[in-house]
Every structure is written in structure tokens, then in C-alpha cells.
Amino acid sequence: MNSSDKPENKKPFVYIGDELGHTEEYLGDSSTTYTENGKIYAAIAGFLSIDEKNRQIYIEGSYTERQKTPLPGDIVMGVVYSIRKTSVGTKINTINNLVVVDMGLIGNVHVSNVSKSYVDKLDEIFEKNDIVRAKIIRQEGREFQITLVDNNLGVIKSFCKYCGHEMKRKNKTQVICPFCGNVQRKIMANDYGEFEEVLHF
């Protein structure tokens, strides 16, 4: 953000994941920050505000309240937790790059929305803890139907089911473990292997 965006605000602008302080010195605001290993990080983008009297850090910005319900067309990221015969369940952790903490949002991708090509067995192309990027189709009860059918959607990071190492792209349809050589088919986003941001839960 350049200085012309909000010249009247002298507070520093921070981005998601920026380190803001230590829990020994300050309390984080649960709606705009998160803590990890004794440090406080930004959960949303906005202007950093420090309440010295109450020793609390919070963020002011366009997200005064975090978006809590995904809408059709929103891009979400989540972690695979359930692989069924005809669908894959994911725990949604971000909505349009905005971290969602402990909201219990569940995304469900039906086999027909996994790929443009035919998919037979979902457990052969997904593993628990795969990180996926998906698009919201609609809400059904307490779950959200999502799709992976687009070039920028699909698995963006995965880990070897045998040794736990991060899987690397082998070709357009397969990943390989650099440690043990395990090869697996994946429905990958076009930037698989290039995604550097760490999801915080």
C-alpha cells in the first residue's frame, strides 16, 4: 500500500502473517491476530494499533469483522480431513486469503467437481492433510459445496503418506516424494510447488 491510499492514518500497515509482537509483552486480539510459539501475528491486513494501557495489539482495516460465511464464488483454502467414496471433506482455513480461526467451516467437494476428466477413486488422488484451493458453489446445511475445476484450483501442497515429507511435482498429474520416492496422482492447482504461504490453524 502506498502513502496515497490513506495519508491521514499514521499507523503502520501490516499484512496477513506479519509478526507484531510477543505474548510476554502484549495480548493479541482474537478477531484480528493469532499467536504461535509465543509470537503474535496478523490474521488480517490493516493498520496496526497498540493499546499500551491494556497491553493489547489489534488491527484496524477493511476487515473490522472477519468474513465468517463463504459466499458463492469465494476462493477458499483448506485441509483434507475426510475421503469418502464420492466426496472429499475439507476444513476451511481461509476465505479470499483471509484467515478464519476456529470457525468449524466444512467444504465438501463431490467427485463430479474434482476434475474435468473422469475420476474413479478419490482415495488414490487425495490424502488427509492435503492443502487445497477451491471455489464455493453453494451452501447446503452446515457444509459448503466446493469445486476444484479450474486451473488455479486443486491441491497446492501435499505430504508423503509414508514418511511425511513434502511431495514435489513430477509432472502434470503426479507428485513424488524426494525422500522415499513414493509417487501419487494428484489433481493439482497450476501453482502447485510454488505456493510458499504457510496456513496457520
Image (spheres, rainbow, N blue to C red):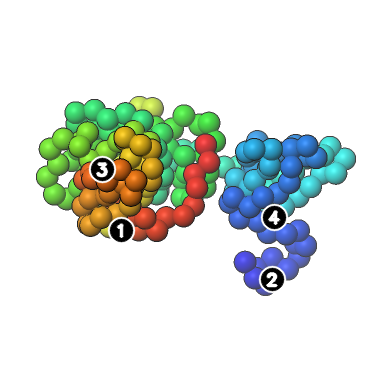
Viewer can see residue 97: yes
Q: Which residue is mark 3?
A: 182
What x and y, as percent, mark residue 43? 60, 45
Which quadrant of the structure image shows residue 56? top right
- Which of discs 3 and 4 lies nearer the camera? The answer is 3
Q: CA distance from mark 1 to mark 3?
A: 21 Å
Q: Which residue is mark 2?
A: 3
Report the disc number at residue 26. Answer: none
Q: Say what amino acid the circle numbered 1 marks.
A: Asn
What x and y, as percent, mark residue 99? 53, 43
Residue 142 falls left or right of residue 11: left
In which quadrant will I find the N terminus? bottom right
Q: CA distance from mark 4 to mark 2?
A: 13 Å
Q: Say what amino acid the circle numbered 3 marks.
A: Asn
Q: Which residue is mark 4?
A: 47
Q: Which residue is at a point 31% across and 35% down the rendered structure image?
A: 161
Q: Which residue is at a point 67% across and 50% down the rendered structure image?
A: 19
Single out the residue that lies furthest toward the front: 180
Q: Residues within 10 Å of mark 2 (few under 14, many from 20)?
A: few
